[in-house]
Amino acid sequence: MLAFASTPLFEPSAIPLLLEKISSSLPSAKVESFKYLSYCTLKYGGDRMEKYTESLWSALKDAIFTCPHSILSVDSYTIDGIGFHESEIMAQAHELLQVLVQQHNASFLNLILGDGDISTFLKSFSQFNDFNSLSSEYKQRLHAVARILSVCVKSSGSSCNKVFESFFPRLVDALRFSVENSPEAIHSALDAKFNFGALYLCVELLAACRQLVVSSDKVASAPDLSHDTWCQILHSFSTSLCNVFFCLIRASCAEITWNAYVYAAVKGLEILATFPGSFISASKFMYEKILLTLMSIIESDFNKTFLWKAALKVLVEISLFVNKYDEDVKAASFNSIVMQKIVSLISSGDLNMPLSLKIQAIFDIGMTRKSFMLAAASQLEKTISANLSEIFVHGNLQLAELTAVLLECYSIKVLPWFHCNGGADEVSLNFAVNIFAKMENITSLSLGVKGNEFLDATMAAMKQAVAGCSMESQEKVLRKAFDVMATCSLFLSKDLILGTNRFNEKSQLCQTFDGLSCRDEWITSLFASVVIALRPQTRIPNIRLLLQLLTTTLLEGHLPSAQALGSLVNKLPVNISENCSLEEVIDTLFKNEMWCNIIIGKECNDGGAVNMGNPRISSMNSHAVIGLAWIGKGLLMRGHEKLKDVTMTFLSYLVSSGHNRNLLPFKDQIKDGAEHEVLCLRKSAADAFHILMSDSDACLNRNYHAIIRPLYKQRFFNIMLPMFLSAIVKCDSSTTRCFLYQAFAHLISETPLAAIVGDAKKVLPVLLDCFLMLSKDVSHKEIIYSVIIVLSGIITDKNGQEAIVENAPTVICRLTELTSYPHMMVIRETAIQCLAAMSEFPYARIYPMRTQVLQALSKALDDTKRVVRQEAVKCRQAWASIASRSLHF
């Protein structure tokens, strides 16, 4: 292309050659020809190209009018669903057309306006009455003419004048004739005779002249277009056009056949309402009528999905326009007509409009301007606060579900938006403090089980709000949270909250209480949410009191307290204050007298791991193990050496057999209550490794400012693998082995595959034994699925295939057993997929197992789940291909 245009001397040879190539039957040749012609036309200049204008126009018209790869469509589920999906040929042809119109403005425009085909087409509007009666050929011709005229309009003010003078009055008259003389067509979707051709062309020309105005505003030296002929014509017809569009919208219905008309009408209103500056195509009265009409659709026509979404999109575009061009008058009208009504939707008692649509409308429009979003957030907070009062005081649980949705919206939409656009600190602080103030004013609370989901939603919003606060704001929220905690029944006096340092005086805490009341649970959960979301640099007053409080509630089975403790030890700085360090906090936590008394019934020793070896344990011990797991997770993620004590504690529980030497953890085999408690405790110790290794959305993640050491999972895996392998080898108890396999499965299922593949030869034998041991109990199905995912990763990884080949018989044996696993379909599916992958392994290693595999697959062909049967068919074909001579179908 650069060579063709390198010198104007090539013009006599290059242009005829390119024009000839356009007639090629190859689409790629047409595309290249138009691309070269566009570039050469710019380089050769207007004088040299003048003699080719008629030939170029003829070639362009043929390509644009007859291109077979463009389809006009209207999708009822998308707002931009109407339009041609243009081929590359048409795209390049339009680019050349734009170059020619700009280069040969008057002469080339006269060719277009005087073209007989276009004139004939524009006179035949009667063919375009009903959108559904139009053939594909007519639709394509309509789109082609619209694109050609739009290119002319956008090229310059003079071109726009000529096009508007020639065609626009005729188009508007055709529209007005349709409205005035066919009212039954406007109000009946079944007998529609509205002139769609005129409507479509009119809207496209409006869009083109608006684009001309916008582009001229960006160029300081551009001429003033506000006094051009086209602008005067548009002013004279703007009221008529608005009335036509209003009429179409009023006549709209749920029929998909009207989506094309609806789309054109709302697009036309959007264009008329968004001409910048002096190009006021719609008067203030008409502009406000447009807004009122669109708002009426939002409030009343929410059951008409296409119309409702189209109206909302137009309101969003108008709001963006007002904000971009500083249209004060239009902004005032938009605020009073749209924003105030939109914001009031959230608190309205109208139950007909779905809440999801209310939220979508509020925040789609709210996010266009910070002042709008502040108003939306303020109204949302007021509504949440009012609902909380109704729920807490009057026990109206029907509002709980609705309020949970509002809280989720606040967490997912409002706070992240302010975080990206500024103002998050103030909004988040107000929200968090107001929630605690609401809790402080409540003396009693009883929500029952139905309130759990509501509490979860409130906690999520609290964490999101506190996480977005600055350190100073977080300290304010924390002080407020401490004040509210002082009203809980856990405390005998308020002195504890005010900073006294009598940590070991048991009189400060209620040592005997029957669990958490509903109010205490809410306050403690919200308090824990604040702690979880704190920044590492945030100063925490009276850290020892905080540890004692969270430990107390943790031992009552309060999971958020455990997560808060883990977050604390993860994020506390090494030197918390002049009188306290991180090491002192951790030592205090592990040597907590209350913790030790409840867990082991005696005083803690002076060092080492937390001693939990006494088999006579209260029911709170499982809660203690879970709490210790979250503490260990916080230490693990920051790479603290104290993690070793935590993990050794868990391992000691896993390998200690006590009086249950050969008792598998099956409920029907447990005859003694003490044995059951011990088994539950050991099960908790095994599950602790899942907590240690898994990623959590609730805490200890980057959203909540956790300290995360790179590759911490890989390091922990490398440390623990030898310990597990040694413990498994030494184990002589089936019960202990079962718990070790559970813990090992949790370890490897959360470890990055690359680390496992490096030790695949060590891991694989134990991994296969996990299937054998854990498949006996249905409660282990999730663990089995996690392990088989790890196995599939090893099978498909080139670095892990050597270990698979060495253990091929055992691997295949375990997989064939899992093809009939009854408790989870996805395990059967994955096992069959693994067998299919292994069919590509060396023939000598897998051939002896083919009979066993084919027998298992024969049973899988009768599986109740279709997806399993499909995988079995593919797998059977793969295995049959390796020994087809000895197969008998």
Image (cartoon, rainbow, N blue to C red):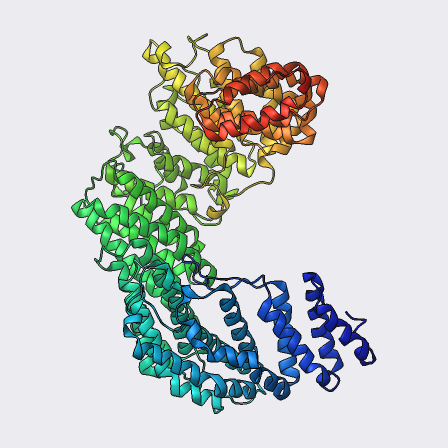
| Residue 647 makes an appearance in the image | no
- Residue drawn at x 54%, y 39% is 638
- Where does residue 871 sit, x and y in percent of width and height? 54, 29
- Can you say whether 297 is above or below 809 in the image? below
- Residue drawn at x 50%, y 46% is 702
- Can you say whether 39 is above or below 863 in the image? below
Identify the image quadrant of the C terminus: top right
Considering depth in this image, is 653 or 13 the residue closer to the camera? 13
Q: Is residue 628 left or right of residue 11?
A: left
Q: Is residue 28 left or right of residue 345?
A: right
Q: Quadrant of residue 332?
A: bottom left
Identify the image quadrant of the N terminus: bottom right
- Where does residue 195 sit, x and y in percent of width and height? 39, 74
- Can you say whether 866 is above or below 10 in the image? above
- Can you say whether 756 is above or below 773 in the image? below
| Residue 580 makes an appearance in the image | yes
- Residue drawn at x 64%, y 65% is 89
Q: Quadrant of residue 449?
A: top left
Question: How many numbered marks does the figure carry?
Answer: 0
- Where does residue 436 sit, x and y in percent of width and height? 29, 50
Considering depth in this image, is 660 or 104 the residue closer to the camera? 104
- Where does residue 715 sit, x and y in percent of width and height? 61, 32
Q: Name the outermost residue toward the left.
A: 394
